[in-house]
Amino acid sequence: MAASPAVQKEVLSEDQVAFYHRHGYVILENVLSADELAGLQAASERLKEERARLAGDDRLAVIHNVALMDDAFMAAARHPVMLAAVTQLIGANLRLQHCKLNWKPPAKGAGEVHWHQDFPFFPHTNYDLLACMFLLDDAVPENGCMRFIPGSHLRGPVDHYDENGKFTGRSTDDRDYADDVARGNVVDMVVPAGSMTIHHCCMLHASYPNHSDTPRRGLVYQIAAGDSIQLGGNLHKVWPIWLQGADPLQARLGDGTVFRLNQGLTNVGGLEPSADWRKVTQD
Ligand SMILES: O=C(O)CCC(=O)C(=O)O
């Protein structure tokens, strides 16, 4: 396991922590320095071919495992401000569940993401699981910023299955979001490049299509508390990467029950980080 940096000092105020628990998200503006932002933008450009291979020029490209593709993305996975904020929200033992670059190309009107929660994609034993998105471009509705339904995380997981029981990757019962949208209980994540949004795994969220002439790139680190153990869904190649602290060797359920684990999850089927990431099926 890679050496973990010391836990940083607190970066969220008490109000921000309370806001996260109450509303399911928090925004940290201008987390990245100008150099860090430029470095991550340059790293994104180095993935241009991969973006085109995955999605062409007119779809949202979701490029997984970017931390294994470029050192800049691996370094950002341990950004001290991100780790400090996440520590305040879900504790000091932190596992990287997945990381990806969401690249919304400047195709007119492409890249809309329907209402959904993250948790149903990769259920865990508890909800101490969240997504941090570094914005590499200014995010506004016109270029496809995310939209959150504040407080929706408190409802727990909602239906993402069709009438045949097939997982659809989107909220399938419009009663779970339509009323909020009609009432205006929706917040657009309008933030400048270099900022970070953090949202709870049960946050109902969506994003607008990109109608602008420039891309909207969001770098996402999905982070789990060490005792929040994945129950299903995709295990990505970055899964063995421990971000901070130590594996507590226990699984905590939502009701507080704790099971000791005799060893950490061990993959013997080849899901190890390597430079050979193209050969592994990811999704
Ligand atoms: O990149 C976006 O606009 C959507 C991101 C999102 O909803 C997700 O990654 O779950």
Image (tube, helix red, strand yellow):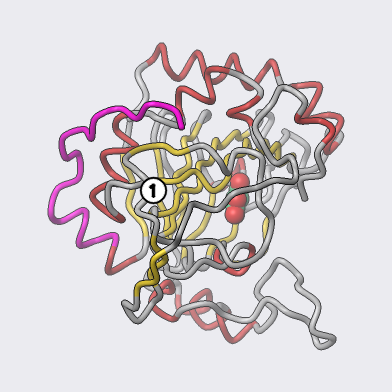
Left or right, residue 73 beside residue 114: left
Q: Which SS does the magenta portion mostly show? A: loop
Q: Could you tell me which residue is drawn at 43 percent across and 60 percent down?
A: 187
Name the residue located 29 percent from the left edge and 60 percent from the top edge: 20
Q: Is residue 268 left or right of residue 28?
A: right
Horizontal and vertical percent for residue 133? 48, 42
Is ligand 1 closer than 8 angstroms to the Cβ of mark 1? no
User: Is 118 rendered above or below residue 153?
Assistant: above
Q: Is residue 104 magenta-colored?
A: no
Q: Residue at x 64, y 66 (%)?
A: 232
Q: What residue is pinned by disc 1?
A: 247
Residue extending furthest toward the front: 262
What residue is drawn where x is 75% and y is 30%? Answer: 277
Number of numbered discs visible in the structure rendering: 1
In front: 10, or 278? 278
- Rendered location of residue 79, percent (x, y): 37, 28
Assess whether residue 19 is covered by the magenta stretch: yes
Q: Where on the picture, by quarter, is residue 171?
A: bottom right
- Circle 1 SS class: loop
252 left or right of 207 in image: left
Q: Which residues are magenta?
A: 1-20
Kind of residue at disc 1: Asp
